[in-house]
Amino acid sequence: MLWALALKYQWIGKNVNLNLLVETLERFLQSRKFKTRREDATGSYQLFATLRTPEGEVRCTNVNVSGTPSDFTVQLRVAEQTHIVWKLSPLFSFFGGGALLSKKLKSAEFYQRFEEEFWRYLEDKILQFTDSEKLFS
């Protein structure tokens, strides 16, 4: 799968229980009707999520949480080349690709809203789970 956009942030000194964080992120995705698959490895967690829209389009995202409770990163990737749509939109309309452009713009808007909501949710949960590793160890 071609991942078009990846955003990655790091947190240091939060002492967050990563398993609890990943479980919460998985529930977040499921509450937004994504079907999820989780893969755990030493020091790393992967969430693969897909969503089928009412129009039959498939939206995909991947979340990777890696590191230790006191030094971890979260990476969000989306499988959509939304940035190209904005650059080429004048060409699409000029050559009669308005319907395709409209479909791509809806997808781009979806991912933009989803990313904003995801990062806000994650920040809130990290604040809530700060020092949670002490409770679970």
Image: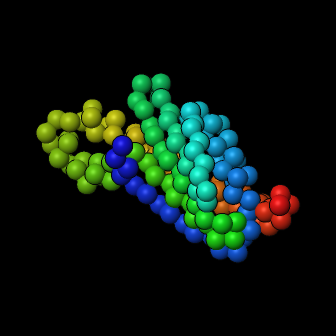
Task: Please tell me in which quadrant of the rendered image residue 104 appears.
Answer: top left
Residue placed most toward the observer, 10 or 97: 10
108 is higher (above) or lower (below) than 121: above
Residue 32 visible in the picture: no
Q: Residue at x 74, y 59 (%)?
A: 17
Q: Residue furthest right?
A: 135
Image vertical order of residue 101 relative to residue 69, above or below: above
Q: Quadrant of the C terminus?
A: bottom right
Q: Does residue 37 sit above or below 115 in this rendering?
A: above
The residue lying toward the viewer, choosing from 40 and 126, is 40
Quadrant into which the N terminus falls: top left
Taking the image as shown, residue 63 lies to the left or right of residue 6, namely right
Residue 100 percent coordinates (x, y): 27, 35
Q: Give the residue drawn at x 34%, y 47%.
A: 2
Residue 52 x/y as whole percent: 48, 29
Q: Position of residue 77 (x, y in %)?
A: 46, 52
Residue lying at the far bottom of the rendered structure: 13
Residue 22 position, x and y percent, is 66, 50
- Between 112 and 66, the residue placed more toward the observer is 66
Q: Relative to 124, is 89 on the left or the right? A: left
Q: Residue at x 47, y 29 (%)?
A: 53
Q: Is residue 85 visible to the viewer in this orientation of the structure?
A: yes
Numbered marks: total: 0
Q: Single out the residue that lies furthest toward the front.
A: 42
Q: Residue at x 67, y 41 (%)?
A: 27
